Each structure stands twice: as structure tokens, then as C-alpha cells.
Image: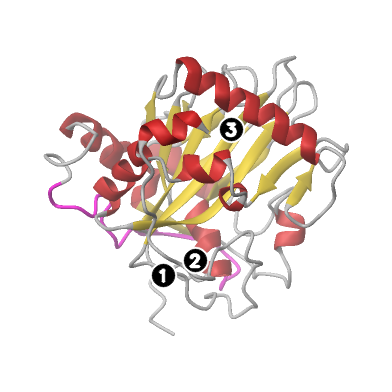
Amino acid sequence: MVKDLYPSRINETSQIVRRQDPVIHNENARTEGPLSAEQVDFYEENGYILLKSFFQGEELKKLKQELDSTMEDHQHKEGPDIIKEPSSNEIRSIFEVHKDKSYFENLSKDERLVSIMEQILGSQVYINQSRINFKPGFKGKEFYWHSDFETWHVEDGMPRMRALSCSIVLTDNYEYNGPLMLVPGSHKWYVQTAGETPDNNFESSLQKQEVGVPDEDSMRWLVDQAGGRIDRATGPAGSVLLFESNTMHGSAGNISPYPRSNVFFVYNSIENKLEQPFSGKEPRPEFLANRENIQPIQPVSTKSTARQ
């Protein structure tokens, strides 16, 4: 195993250390790629960027249709890749939608998305994880603050911070229906959380994450570094949120009447494939962390995606 640059869950107390990887891995990112130099700068500084109304018109209509049909198809199914709310039978997440041989698989390969990921990550990419998230009105539960990379590193063996999440907004995100909240600039720091990883931690963490979350003092420090800012990813359906693997984020519960849903693709550099988990535990299942037959994405043309 390679040297662990980001140890976590090894002490009884938390510690904050500086990030050791670049945020933009492509030296030509500001002159080559779909994002403008200003957008690349914003992402590098804040750890996220929201591209409003990325999908519109017929494409957005198709997105919503696919969301509804997927929800209907899975409502009465059971399985480890279908996560339901702890206090109800409402679906919370459906995993591995990029392997469904239909619309969402094609969407994950959309050349407009893939070219942005390659622009930021400086290499070809593959999907490390995918899912559809549902947060129903009145019942959608909160999800506590966390850095995805901390979990991906400790429990999955992702070596470096060279991945990002792409969240495609499928329903309008308002300030009051539990939108994702992000701490700008938090990706520049790594919170080594306290405690240790239980066996099969994923079985409970997908409903309520309690291991690998920052303590209150660390969160207060990160927000202070951001000048007291906590940003909310609000915007119309069809918007695309990109956020860095180590950006601290979470969401409040949804007690509004309006549901919130998104399709979520994790793009990882082909040069940053998963190794053995740094926790020393068994790897999480394939539907959470892809290891099998990893190949670079071959982008699909925009027109092909729209026709699906």
C-alpha cells in the first residue's frame, strides 16, 4: 500500500491539516475546455460551482420523465443498492444508475459533462459511484456535514484528491426544501476525524452518517475561515452542481411540501483508481465504489444523449 497522505479515524480527537493535492490538475485548464477562466478560478477558490440551467427544454423534460419512471420502477424493490429513509419506506437513494444500459448511463457519458471533468482533473475519467437521490417533501431527512473524500479514502482506498461530484438538479432547489449546503474554501483543509471505522459501516452510514463526520469545533473553524459563509446550492431543475471531493457539505431536512431530487455522478481520474481501503477494512461493495473493469469514459455526443 502507498503511503497514507490523509490518515483519519486513528485518534480519539480530530485534527485539521492542509490539503496536499492541487484543486485544478490541468495546467491548461484556464485556456482549454468548456469552463471559462473565471469559472475555473471560482471552482479552485470555493471548491464548487453551480452551472444554472445546464439542461433545458426537451432535455430537461426527458430528465424529469426518467426520474419519475425510475422512482416508480424501484418503489417496491428491495436491495442493498436501494436506500430508504430510516423512519419511512420512502426511497432515499438508488445506486449504480450509470450501469443501467439506458438513459442515465448515456447521461454519465455526455461529452459536455465529461469534457468539464477532464478540464479540471487533467486526465481521462471514469465513474467511481452514481446514484439518484430523493428527498421527499415533509419527510426528507437531513444528512450531516462530511467530506466525501474522507470516506472514499478511508473506506474505499481512493489515494488522492483527484475526483469531483457532479449533481444534476432534477427538481427546483429552493432554500427551504433541503438543498445541499457547502462551506466555501473548506476543500483546502482535511479534517482527520476521531474514532475508528466499524465493520460494514456502509450499512448504517448510507441512512445516517455518524462515523467520519467532523466535530463541532472543526466545523466552526472551517466556517470561520470562510468568513462565516455557508452557501446553498439553489437553482432551477436542469442546473449542474460540481463540487470538489474534499468540500465539506451537508443538507438539512425537508419539511416543505416540495421534493428535492438529483442524479449524482462521481468522476474520478483514471490515474487515481481505488486501492485497498486505508482503514484496513474490507472494501465497500461495488455499487458504492467501482473497482471492476475500470476504463476511461468514451464520451457520447450531445445529440445522442438528447435522443435517449
Is tag 2's residue or tag 3's residue first in the polypeptide sequence? 2
Label number found at residue 153: 2
Residue 157 falls left or right of residue 80: left
Q: Which residues are magenta?
A: 9-28
Residue drawn at x 20%, y 40% as measured from the top left: 33
Residue 177 magenta-highlighted: no
Residue drawn at x 57%, y 71% as measured from the top left: 11
Residue 6 coordinates in the image, percent (x, y)? 42, 68
Residue 254 coordinates in the image, percent (x, y)? 71, 24
Tell me the element at label 1.
loop
Mark 1 vs mark 3, CA separation in Å: 27 Å
Residue drawn at x 51%, y 59% as measured from the top left: 150
| Disc 2 residue type (three-letter) | His
Tell me the element at label 2.
helix
| Disc 3 residue type (three-letter) | Asn
Q: Tag count in the figure? A: 3
Q: Are marks 1 and 3 in contact (CB under 8 Å)?
A: no
Residue 14 visible to an observer of this rendering: no
Tell me the element at label 3.
strand
The one nearer the camera, 165 or 211, is: 165
- Image vertical order of residue 82 relative to residue 53, above or below: below
Residue drawn at x 64%, y 78% as measured from the top left: 281
Residue 113 visible to an observer of this rendering: yes
| Disc 1 residue type (three-letter) | Pro
Which residue is identified by label 3?
A: 262
- Image vertical order of residue 140 relative to residue 3, above or below: above
Residue 225 falls left or right of residue 56: left
Magenta: main secondary structure: loop
